[in-house]
Image (cartoon, coloured by chain):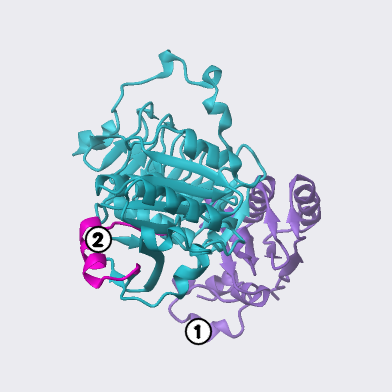
Amino acid sequence: MVVRRPVVVMELPEQIGANEAAEIFQDVSSLLEFQRPRIVFDLSHVRSVDNDGVQMLLHCLDEAMKRDGDLKLAAISPQSQMILELMRADGIFEIFETAGEAVRSFNVPTLAAMPEDAFLYAGQADDLDTLRRAS
Amino acid sequence: MFGAIIVVGEKDAADFGAVRAPRSTQVLGGVQLACVEVLGRSILEAMIENLRVAGVGPISVLRRWSTANVDAWYRFSQTPVSVPGGVEFCCVEDLSAAVGLKLREQQESGTEATLVMPLGPYVELDASDLFQFHRAQRQSATPLVDRDGSLDMWLVETACFASAPDVVASLPALQAASYEVSGYVNRLDHPRQLRRLTVDALTSKCGLRPLGQEVRPGVWCGEGAHIRRGARILAPAFIGRDSVICDDCEIVDCSSIERDCEVDYATAVSDASLLSNSYVGIGLEIRNSIVNGSSLLSLEHDVTLEIKDPFVMRQNKALGNEANRPSPAEIEVPGMLFNPAEEAAN
């Protein structure tokens, strides 16, 4: 039996400075202890992100990827988008319009990663590893 | 031929007909777009120069006295502009009365007609054609328009309006044959237009020329501009007076770096303008934006951000201090604007 780890959605605060970044990372750390963490940061309330905030986002992504997981961003405001662009971090994250879309994206394997008969398994398979094993 | 009175409006003032300075004043620190520098000179200076070259004079520049923007105004009036003398700057209490007074002065000095205009749009006029049109129409005032409508500029018979009670209020209501400006017009009613003017000037689509030396085809540098060897500048581009471009920076896509700026190590500036005295930090990417000190205006998102981290963006006043200038040992070959690796590859 394959257990699918849930996608965790975290709503980030209005401002992400050094202090908030440290708090958020502390909260996320517990999720990052597991294999394949799947995290969505909902930035819909975020109005201001500074350099420390961007570093925290990058650090979380790095830690998630080390454990074969991923971190995606959702509902990002133009202001936050500008900061990511300024810091050249916009291309590093997958960014979605809504948290729902970001969550759903974890369950859709990319075509390149799927075996030829992937669609046969897609309805039953829990994740890419299952697909690979099935193929 | 004729004289000119340029009226500098304010953000909230209905000083002059429909003086337009709405959002632009907010995003650029309360300074009218026409007062910020583009390619080394303000629109005010550029307009004055255009008028002088066309033989227009005397020129009076009037602004309402107030505490706001006094620094900027002081700089404009004190900076030696690149036009001959004969330009008068006045801070006044009552703009309308001041316009009347200047018209009377110009009448006494024998000026037949006066161009009355707000500082706002950047306009390239054929002054003699305008004057001939005005004379042919035999009217007391000729409004100037372009294909998008009124420019809030009028060529008036000096004698007719010298004794008028309120010239500023009466001009917009006048019905008269309009003169359509055939030259380049940029209304500067949005910061996006400031970028358009920069691009048009760098690509020779208008008469505004960068203030500096063309050190490579399409690359202009102001006096004292310092471009490190490892920086990459792709034409057309402008680097203003006393600005520093550090190693591994890229300045591309018609970008302009105005005077006293610093672009720190490995930052890319693409299709963007850095207004004077701005510092941008290490490893950033500034694209399709206008930077004014710590303010970043994204033209793509139409959003202005105030960057609080001085290591990312700030006013670059420290660079104006001689003690903080690079020592002579740091100064590299002037005019070394190409990337040696790239040149070798070519």
Above-or-below relation of B131 to B64? below
Q: Magenta region: which residues? A: B121-143
Above-or-below relation of A43 to B346? below
What residue is disc 1 on?
A119
Mark 1: amino acid: Phe
> Position of A133 compared to B247: left or right?
right
Chain with colour purple in the figure: A
Q: Colour of chain B?
A: cyan
Q: Nearer the viewer, residue B250 or B43?
A: B43
What residue do we see at 64% from left, 68% from top? A74
- Which numbered mark, 2 or 1, is in the foreground of this view? 2
Residue B223 drawn at (x, y percent): 35, 28
What residue do we see at 63% from left, 66% from top? A76
> Position of B127 compared to B80: left or right?
left
What residue is disc 2 on?
B131
What residue do we see at 30% from left, 53% from top? B2
